[in-house]
Structure formats: structure tokens, C-alpha cells
Image (cartoon, rainbow, N blue to C red):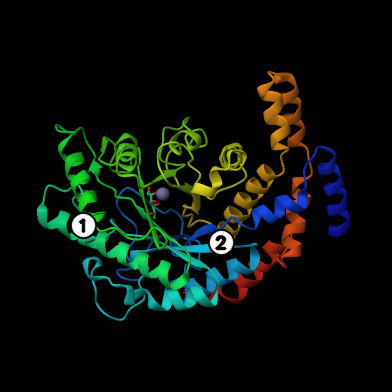
Amino acid sequence: MDIEKAYAEAKAAYAEIGVDTDLALKKLAQIPLSIHCWQGDDVRGFLFNEAASGGIQTTGNYPGRARNVEELRKDLEEVLTLVPGPYKVNLHAIYADTDEKVDLDQLEPKHFKTWVDWAKKNHVGLDFNPTCFSHPKAASGFTLSSADDEVRNFWIEHCIRSRKIAEYFGKELGKTCVTNFWIPDGYKDIPYDRLAPRKRLMDSLDQIFKEKIDKKYDIDCVESKLFGIGVESYTTGSNEFYMGYAVSRQIGLTLDSGHFHPTEVISDKIPSVLLYVPHLLLHVSRPVRWDSDHVVIFTDELNEIARSLIRTGLIDKTSIGLDYFDASINRIAAWVVGLRSTLLALLKAELEPKEKIAKLELQGDYAGRMMYMERLKQMPYGIVFDYYCYKNQKKVGLEAMDEIRRYEKEVTAKRG
Ligand code: RNT
Ligand code: ZN
């Protein structure tokens, strides 16, 4: 296929309905996606190198998992060659790169210095997460909402230090670090007291966020969840808990698409919560019957999320991070598919004649609105995306898979 020629035709088709494809691509190129580093090693990290626990689980044992920081970075660099940018890389505290034997309550910016150097070299920003799981001190099922003061203080200290690391990222890289706080806390079985753990969590968070950090460097967000494996009956950090917390403290809220009831979607929450919280972080995931963290693909809900952000302009107050971990397929492909699908959904949303359809709606012309919205479904957005990849010297379409197979043969398949 002659991509330039195909693009010229697609451009003309879009122009007919009042859409400027060049402008849409320019806007797309301004949206940084945050690549979750944990897809590369099944959420193990380097500090303790333990399988994930705390209500989350990776399944599958496809060969080639990154076993150390060098392998993970090499894999991320490979991903970056396959997807048009800009990007940030999202780190968890357990991905510290250090020879020192440090626990989570001792981490300092210096333990992430090589990540900062790497980020500069690869022109990416860094985002951050305290790791309040997969640790002996989280074995009781409780961290920031623990009734054991020693345990609770350990996690408070870890989170306070995490914010300092985030601030360091923001300062060093000149790109705001978005820091996400998620804890697994909860009960497997029906609790007697549903209030006390939440009071403790509220107090812990207030201690963590007491120090004011310039929002230029760090934006803090809190992530709720419905339930986790082994935490089926009660989650301290529920949706209502964090929504109330974020609104009352005016900090960011994280919406993970896998953290709600199976028929509940986050796309419709976006235009509500952003009326009340200053910042939104999305964890784009794909739940299959539960928070299974499947690879993000081009689903209806992914498209709805993109539309919620683009039609409203709320993208300006939103950070988009991916959050899934599939260990059953090639991990580079897992990253690339999720990133490309997200970009495609954002592009498709950029390729709408916004004012025109909004006007039909305001005039009460719902049939006209329906016609337009149906027509958009058959417009050649895929060609525009191919052109975008091509123009950015990224492999187009299935060619990306050829490159992933080459990398697998030469690199990941050789790992023990
Ligand atoms: C868990 C949350 C959380 C984690 C990552 C690793 O259900 O979604 O965001 O997936 O922080
Ligand atoms: Zn998440």
C-alpha cells in the first residue's frame, strides 16, 4: 500500500465532514502515555524479586521475562522503537536500581539515579508508585490502614519517601511526575468494623501529604478498588473513600478501568469527577469478569474513555497510564498492542467534527447527531494512524510483529 497516497485520500474524506487530519495528528502528538514498567517482568521488581501478592496476580509463564534492570530497560527501549511518542515510564518503588540492601522505608532519590539518567537519554519522563504490596509487612493484608502502628508507620514512611523520589524525578527531568497511591488493604471475609480501617487510612494519607511539594514536580493521585483476590469482602480504599479524600484534600484521583463492578465503566465517571478533583490519572486496563489486567485492546470502552477526554478538553487535566500484566504472551507485544490501541482510540476521538455534532445536540437534532456518530465509525481512521506511524519512522501495522519476533528470537528467547 502507498501510505502517503492512502493518507491523502483519508485526509480528503475527513475534510468533507469538517475534520483536519493533520491537526488531529498534531494534537495526538501532544499526549504523553505512561508506560507501566511492570508488564516487562510480571510485577516482580528488583529489590526483592518476589511474585506479586496483595490481591493482584500475574498468570502465565511465557519465556523472556526481564530479570534485571538492564533487561527491562532494553525491552522498554525496544517498545519505544515501535510506538510513536511522547512517553513517560511508570516505575514502582520495587524497581529501584541499587546494590545497597535497602528496605522500602529507606529508599532515597539516589536509588533511582540510573533511571533518571536512562530517562534523559531516552527522552521520556518518569512517573512513580510506592509499592505497598508484595512485602512481608503487607502480609497481614493491611498497610496504611493497619491497626498495628509499627506496620502502619513503615508504610507511611515508604509513601513519604516515595513523594521525595517523585519530586526528584520532576526536578531532574523537567516533566511533572505523577505519583499513584494504591494499597491492597482489606478483608477476605466479612468485617465487623468497616469504619476503623478507613479512619486509619485517612490519617495515614494526611501524614503522607502533609509536606507540600510543588505541583510542577509531583502530582499525587489516589486509586480505589472494588476487591482483590483474597480481599473479597472489604476494601479499605473504596471508590467512595478516595473520591471523598481527593475532593476534600484537592489531590488527584486515579480511575482504574478494572476496579469497578463488571458493568460499570470509567468513561462516564471522567466528566463527573473532574468537576471536583484537580487532576485525574487513568489506569487503562482490561478487566475480563474481574480485575484480570488483560492487555488493553481497541474495545468500545477504550473508545468511550478517549471520547470523554477529547470531546471535553478534559485531557488537559488527565494523565493516561496503562496498567496490566499479561505473562502468557510475548511481553513486548503486550506493551505495543496496549499502547497502539490507546493511541488509535485517542486519534479516533481527535478525528471528530466536535463543534458540528455538539451543535446538532444542542438544537435537539438527535437524528442528525446519530447519523454523524454512526458515520464516524466507518471513517478511515486506521489509515490516518498508519500514516502517523510511518511519518514517525515506526513500523506500520503487522510489520511491528515482525520486529517483535526478531527481537524475541535474538533477545528474549535466550533468557533463562
Ligand atoms: C492493583 C492496582 C495497581 C497495580 C499497580 C501495579 O489492582 O491496579 O495500580 O496494578 O500499581
Ligand atoms: Zn491500577
Residue at screen point 38% across, 51% down: 57
| C-alpha gap between disc 2 and disc 1 | 36 Å
Specify the amino acid type for callout 1.
Ile
Residue placed most toward the observer, 193 or 375: 375
Residue 277 appears in which quarter of the rendering?
top left
Element carrying mark 1: helix
Q: Tag 1: Cα neighbours inside 10 Å, few (<14), some, or many (≥20)?
A: many
Q: Position of residue 47 (x, y in %)?
A: 31, 70
- As drawn, is 248 to the left or to the right of 257? left
Residue at screen point 80% across, 39% down: 18
Specify the amino acid type for callout 2.
Asn
Residue placed most toward the observer, 153 or 21: 21
**Quarter holding the N terminus?**
bottom right
Q: Position of residue 395 (x, y in %)?
A: 72, 64
Residue 99 appears in which quarter of the rendering?
bottom left
- As drawn, is 123 to the left or to the right of 41? right
Q: Position of residue 77 (x, y in %)?
A: 56, 72
> Mark 1 — residue?
156
> Mark 2 — residue?
330
Q: Which mark is residue 362?
A: none
Number of numbered tags placed on the structure image: 2
Residue 25 appears in which quarter of the rendering?
bottom right
Residue at screen point 36% across, 64% down: 166
Q: Position of residue 71 (x, y in %)?
A: 48, 75
Residue placed most toward the observer, 132 or 363: 363
- As drawn, is 27 to the left or to the right of 205? right
